[in-house]
């Protein structure tokens, strides 16, 4: 997520999902955003959509991301599902887990789906040694 630099605001989404959304159920949106490209207020996004062959609410799955100087790679259960050239994402960012209703995208929330939980079993992070 955003580095805090108001002239270079960026975000990489490992997964965005609307589990009970009629428009987005079982879809994994993997995106990289530039919200303010070096102060010119030009915003843009790139990424892909992977249709998951299961209901994400039924079991734990492994979502992975490899971020290098040259590429951004998204994985689901060990399989590469999206790869993009890394054109802009070369600075430190914060790691954030959140659940957002995003009503305009996912649609209205049905009360029968509440309360809703977002569970993470574990998180692992590796850093490549300098020069690799």
Image (cartoon, grey):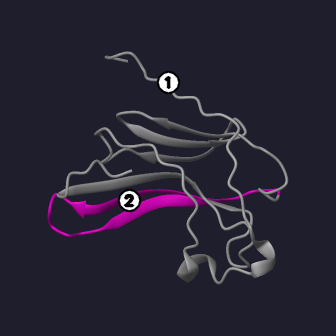
The image quarter in which residue 124 lies = top right
| Percent position of residue 63, x then y | 65, 42
Which quadrant of the figure contains the C terminus? top left
Q: Which residue is mark 2?
A: 33
Q: Is residue 49 magenta?
A: yes
Upstream in sequence: badge 2 or badge 1:
2
Marks 2/1 in contact by CB < 8 Å: the verdict is no
Q: Is residue 92 found left or right of 68 in the rendered image? A: left
The residue at the point 60 percent across, 34 percent down is 123
| Percent position of residue 97, x then y | 53, 50
The residue at the point 69 percent across, 35 percent down is 78
Q: Is residue 52 found left or right of 73 in the rendered image? A: right
Q: Is residue 25 magenta?
A: no
Mark 2 → mark 1, Cα distance in angstroms: 22 Å
Residue span colored magenta = 29-54
* Mark nearer the viewer, 2 or 1: 1
Mark 1 crowd level (few <14, some 14–19, many ≥20, 10 Å Cα): few
Q: Secondary structure at mark 2?
A: strand
Q: How many marks?
A: 2
Q: Observer-nearest residue: 51 or 85?
A: 51
The residue at the point 27 percent across, 56 percent down is 9
Q: Which mark is residue 126?
A: 1
| Percent position of residue 105, x then y | 56, 78
């Amino acid at each position: 997520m955003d580095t805090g630099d108001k002239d270079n605001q960026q975000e990489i989404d490992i997964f965005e999902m609307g589990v009970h959304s009629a428009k987005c159920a079982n879809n994994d949106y993997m995106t990289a955003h530039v919200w303010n490209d070096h102060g010119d207020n030009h915003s843009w996004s790139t990424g892909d959509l992977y249709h998951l062959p299961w209901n994400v609410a039924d079991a734990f799955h492994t979502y992975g991301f490899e971020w290098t100087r040259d590429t951004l790679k998204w994985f689901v259960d060990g399989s590469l599902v999206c790869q993009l050239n890394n054109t802009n994402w070369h600075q430190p960012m914060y790691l954030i887990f959140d659940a957002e209703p995003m009503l305009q995208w996912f649609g209205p929330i049905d009360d029968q789906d509440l309360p809703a939980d977002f569970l993470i079993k574990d998180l692992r992070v590796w850093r490549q040694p300098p020069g690799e």
